Amino acid sequence: MCTTNRSWPMDESAGEDAFAANVAELAAMPPRFAALVAGIAPARWKTRAKDGNFSLQEHACHLRDIEIEAYRVRLERMLAEATPALADVDGGKLARERDYHRQDFATAQAAFAAVRVDMVRRLASLSLEQRRRTGVMEGVGEITVEGLARMMLAHDAEHLADLAQLGRELAR
């Protein structure tokens, strides 16, 4: 369950094409998530994975909260402040405290998609100088805005793999 923020290599600057490809891949996450969900009956959205990992409901709420409270906050602080200290966000703790199974799935999914669209727009508009701005992330160290985008991609990939596994389990 969500380990992508635990260690992160010192990032190197991405070229224009690589950064644009990363941003395009970030834009693809909400539709990919929606496609995975479309194959699962709503009655099964709260069923957790056999390994104890998130249900579809919990994934939707987690993705929304991490996008808003972690990635968007980090990006805005990195752009506005000189090398800000960026807090880690414990996604598992958020899930427990916020009781994701009591929240509305469609609302969480729509909020994640909307915030991701805004994040993609924001990232795509950045100059090379802005993309190289840094922050110091708790438990990780120094990271650039470009590195933050790669961290978001790694987080997406982790959830897509978990969702694919969960989808196979729920389809049985």
Image (tube, rainbow, N blue to C red):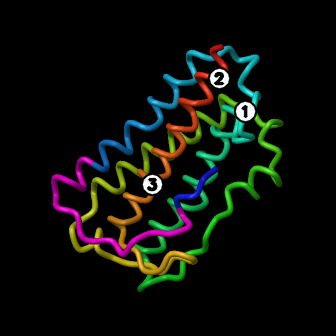
Rounded to the nearest whole Å, what is the CA distance between mark 3 and mark 2? 26 Å
Please tell me which of labels 3 and 2 falls first in the chain. Answer: 3
The residue tagged 2 is 169
The residue tagged 1 is 50
- The reply to whether the C-beta atoms of the residues labelled 1 and 3 are less than 8 Å apart is no
Please, what is the three-letter code of the amino acid marked with disc 1? Lys
Please, what is the three-letter code of the amino acid marked with disc 3? Met
The region drawn magenta spans 5-21
Number of callouts? 3
| Residue 42 position by quadrant | top right
- The reply to whether the C-beta atoms of the residues labelled 2 and 1 are less than 8 Å apart is yes
The residue positioned 50% from the left and 40% from the top of the image is: 114
Mark 1 or 3: in front is 1
The residue tagged 3 is 152
Q: Is residue 6 magenta?
A: yes
Please tell me which of labels 2 and 1 falls first in the chain. Answer: 1
The residue positioned 64% from the left and 39% from the top of the image is: 59
Please tell me which of labels 1 and 3 falls first in the chain. Answer: 1
| Residue 122 percent across, percent down from the top left | 36, 55
